[in-house]
Image: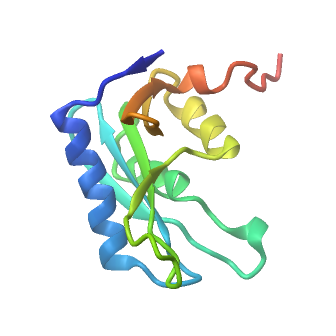
Amino acid sequence: MKYSISIEDETLVAAAKEIITKRYEWERHHVSAALRTRTGEIFTAVHLEASLSRVTVCAEAMVIGKAISEGYKEFDTIVAVRHPDPDSEDRDIRVVSPCGMCRELIADYASDCTVILPVEEGLAKADILDLLPHRYSRK
């Protein structure tokens, strides 16, 4: 199910854009994420690019780890944004949808979390489990 975004969600997007604007480094950090806890704290982080791509750590994983390291385990909403490449004509920092591994990770740590996504009309929120219709299960 998709929901409209709120003023708080726009603040979360702005936080993600702010951290990638500050920490952007070509071939190192071009994606960031912002996470809001159930109690309203906001955490931000950037992804870690590696020369061996499968060692790269997504921004969503980084921000979840950061929040957990600070003692927070109940998550409300998460968003990721991507900084344009240096040769890109489009210079806008845009919201991006989480990859499949991040969807699984978000669902593992907060199955009731919502995710801010790009849609044709702009931005919307969806429940993480709606993004995983056939989620992996050990059972």
Q: What x and y, as percent, mark residue 134?
A: 75, 20
> Along the line of sight, which residue is nearer the eye, 49 or 9?
9
Number of numbered discs: 0
In depth, the one of 37 and 129 nearer the eye is 129
Q: Residue furthest left?
A: 7
Q: Residue furthest right?
A: 139
Position in image of residue 100 (x %, y %): 69, 41
Relative to 32, 105 lies left or right: right
| Residue located at (20% from left, 46% from top) | 11
Nearer to the camera, 11 or 87: 87
Q: Is the C terminus in the top left, top right, bottom left or bottom right quadrant?
A: top right
Residue 64 appears at what percent x and percent y?
46, 48
Which quadrant of the view contains residue 71?
A: top left
Q: How is the image coloured?
A: rainbow
Residue 20 appears in which quarter of the rendering? bottom left
What residue appears at the point 64 percent right and 46 percent down from the top-left corner?
99
Above or below — where is 6 with respect to 101? above
Q: Which residue does the image show at 78% across and 77% down from the upper left?
A: 52
Q: Tell me if 87 is positioned left or right of 133 in this view.
A: left
Residue 23 x, y percent position in the rendering: 37, 78
**Left or right for 4, reference 27:** left
Residue plotted at (73% across, 82% down): 51
